[in-house]
Image (tube, coloured by chain):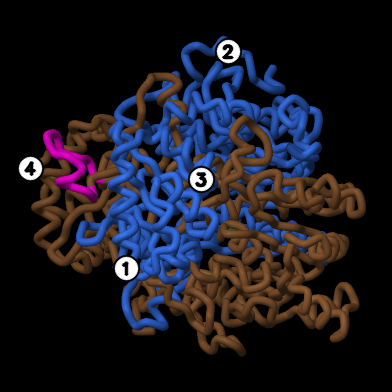
Chain colours: A blue, B brown
Amino acid sequence: MPEVFKDYVREKFSRPGPLRGVRVLEVCTLLFGPSGPSFLAEMGAEVIKIELPPAGDVTRSLNPFGWLYREQGPMFMHINPNKYYMALDLHIDIAQQIFKELCVKADIVEFNLRPAVTNRWNVGYEDIRKVNPQIIYIEKNGFGQWGRYAEEDRPSNDGAAQALSGYAWMSSFPGQPPLKQSIWICDYYGGLMGEVAVLAALHHRRKTGKGQYIEMSQSENIMRTMGWIWPYQQFTGKGAEPTGNRDQCICPADTFLCRDNRFVALAAPAPDEFKGLCTAMGKPELASDPRFRDHATRLKDENAMALLKTIADWARTKTADEIEELSVRNGFSASRLHNGKDMLENPHRRERDFVKYLDDPLYGRYAEHCFPVMMSKTPPKIKWTVRPVGFDNDYIMTKILGRSRSQLDELYMHGVLGRWKDMQGRRPPKEWDGKTGAILRG
Amino acid sequence: MTDYKRAKWAQWADHVRSLDDPAKNYDKPEALDDLVVIDVSSRSMAGCYCSSLLAELGAETIRIEPPGGDIVRTYSPQGIQQKGTGFAYLQEGRNKFHVTLDLETEEGREIFRQLAGNADVIVETFPAGKMDAWGIGYDALSKANPRLIFTSISFLGQFGPDSGRGQYDYDNVSQARSGIQYGTGEVLPEGKTADEMPWAVPTKAGPWIAWSVSGTFAALGILAALHHREETGEGQAIDVSTPEAYQRLHDYALHWYADQGVVQERFSNLDTALWLYGFFPTKDGGVFLGGLRLEMWKAFVDILGKWDEWEADSWTTLAPFMKKDWQLKYQAMINPLTSRFTSEELTRKSIEYARSGRLAPITPVVAEIVSPWKTMHDENWGDRGIFTPVQDPFFGSVVCAQAQWKATETPPRTKWVCRPAGHDNDFIYLRYLGYGPVRLAELKEKGVI
């Protein structure tokens, strides 16, 4: 282990995250929008999530097969950690004014509304850059702000991006209908890429003092990950087609059913790895078989199929764990398919503090993933989970904008600021004592 | 681009386009043009993808391969190569300078150490411990260059009980270990076996998504570390494990198991947690249908002409629809109805409904499930600069996915696609280490470059 990571987990909280001092305003709902600012929040940025009162983010309602956690949508919890919760009705002009005051004191603003809506609300890029020319302003949605699909006002979401990009097409078995992913990959991936754009813009601003406007479509983002498919289609004149679990660019690389009815994935393209696999299978002679002699030769369909058949037959004689063990001993890569149970119980994840139990003032102890980038000098971390709609209004309005108690009362009275509706996921959990976790509340 | 009906807000669209059209990217500054990045990744495309993102933003990126090239150059369907390079690397060699260096030799490592003294960022993907064993890990390099951001992307991370396994990082294995593949795929009907239905198994995503995700998380970490460095002068080591990075994009499965003991299982083309949200058949293929708010689901029912029959008026919440049995019940009712239309017809109905339906402007999401061939030839994406071919001096005109975001000031851009291994040895070794033809010939003779 490198010296620098020796006490990483123990010392995690002794140093701030890398984005300490960066302030972000988020006016986002569902998954594509809020996922990105969460990444910044986990890296130490101050993220203020602004919702429309009193119902807030739709994700508060979502749940797998009816399971809610302390009345809260588990996805909402997972997607929105470490934020401050403000409810500001941006349809009202005074709210728009308050939003602009916050923008003056912010570095980054994020929206995920349909095209041109921010402009209609008087908080579009042109409005905001007048009050803060250094602002980094990003809008994320299905199709961007211009072009045919955007102007047709097509709604979009993750599944649409999977469908329209060809991603689903490529993620199925030959001859079978395209398959939807079980995760909202285009939401999350788009959210992730959005922050690459934002942090690059932050670096540019440091050098030049200039802010900028960034516009992002979730379909376009996922296409960027589909690398080889595009030049393959251009140069061969053929459409790329799916190959199930077989990686058609790497051989061998596939998923196999094992004796214990579990699955294992393995890969062994490099000469040392392939030799190791052949040895593990008890067929060292395969490594010098002319059909398999080098990687490019092995990739030819007929050779690949013959080889994968041999491996599949062997895999049926072993358990998944045995194959994983053999891979370590023989120097190729393999893993049994992990699931929710492994996510929680696998000691490796726990000892790296990638999976941990949070201790939240409102939601108590629950298991969560941490940020998957370990940074030796500025460890990212997860500290708390979500809050009811408008829970941190007073804190934000007082600390950042210096509003007095009576001014706040007036804003509440006019519905500019709002608090939660008496509804699942919006109000505090029943277990809450009415004060733990509240900041600057009289 | 064929004509389409302009939006009421077309003026806004035109204004934004005038500011951020990718066609103007090359006139704009580059966000990272003050950085030097060394990508010494091996066997894994996660490193190449990570350094591509930085190179697209203008970082001077030096890609180091062993003499003869990294094996990633052979990653390609059927092994097809274009002038000695497979299609995968043809995408992720972009904007980089390509040099060769044999790190297995003492002299090669010494040269690497000197190059690293010039770098802001290093990206590597060897199994944990390899760079340290060579004496060119973070602990060694940061002594001479404390501003260095040293980024490791690996299968099992730099620390933790499994970290020392010595295995390289492969996309399909990382997808398997992330926990995501387990819950994705066709459901095997009761009484059937995987031999009878070999496609009804846990299924990985086709593209190299685990690699792309870990590469992108690494790039994000690098940019955050850069922010910290500019504030404090302090560099650092970054550790990304690909299965963890991909798992982080999973949502509630961990929490669900921890709280309820439920392991999330496959649910084919429906969604365990969302309604309306799934793939449905059409006359000529299939569509994605989405409506996560009650009104959107009702709008869809209206489009199908079932508003009255299904009593949509009486629905007050989406909650019951998320339950498994309701999902299956309604799926069975929807399938024959959507099968009467083509994908295009359903798409048009949804767009039309947004204008004139009873719940307008609310409308469900309808998206045709297309092949990547169709995606690549869809004028909308072409117009937005996604598939604009790059005119490469060596490989000619090459289609690259690019312009993944648009920006007024520092958009990403692709200037060239790739180079043969070692193509830039002369330039880079002269530029950074002052090696002229005599020294280079000597190193070549010894097989170091």
Residue B86, given in percent of the width and then of the height, sits at 49, 74
Question: Which type of secondary structure does the marked residue at label 3 adopt?
Answer: helix
Q: Amino acid at mark 3?
A: Tyr
Magenta span contains residue A141: no
Left/right of residue A392 with respect to residue B201 in the rendered view: right
Viewer-nearest of labels 2 and 1? 1
Question: How crowded is the residue under tag 4: few (<14 C-alpha within 10 Å), some, or many (20+)?
Answer: few
Find residue B222 and report its horizontal and vertical position in percent.
72, 53
Q: Is B198 inside the magenta-drawn segment? A: yes
Disc 2 residue type (three-letter)? Gly
Front disc: 3 or 4: 3
Mark linked to residue B309? 4
Q: Residue at x 58, y 25 (%)?
A: A356
Same chain assignment for discs 3 and 2: no
Q: Residue sitting at 63 percent across and 64 percent down? A: B53
Question: Does label 4 lie on the same chain as label 2?
Answer: no
Q: CA distance from mark 3 to mark 1?
A: 29 Å
Span shown in magenta: B186-199
Q: Chain of mark 2?
A: A
Neighbours of disc 3 within 10 Å: few (<14), some (14-19), many (20+)? many
Q: Is there one chain holding both mark 3 and mark 1? A: no
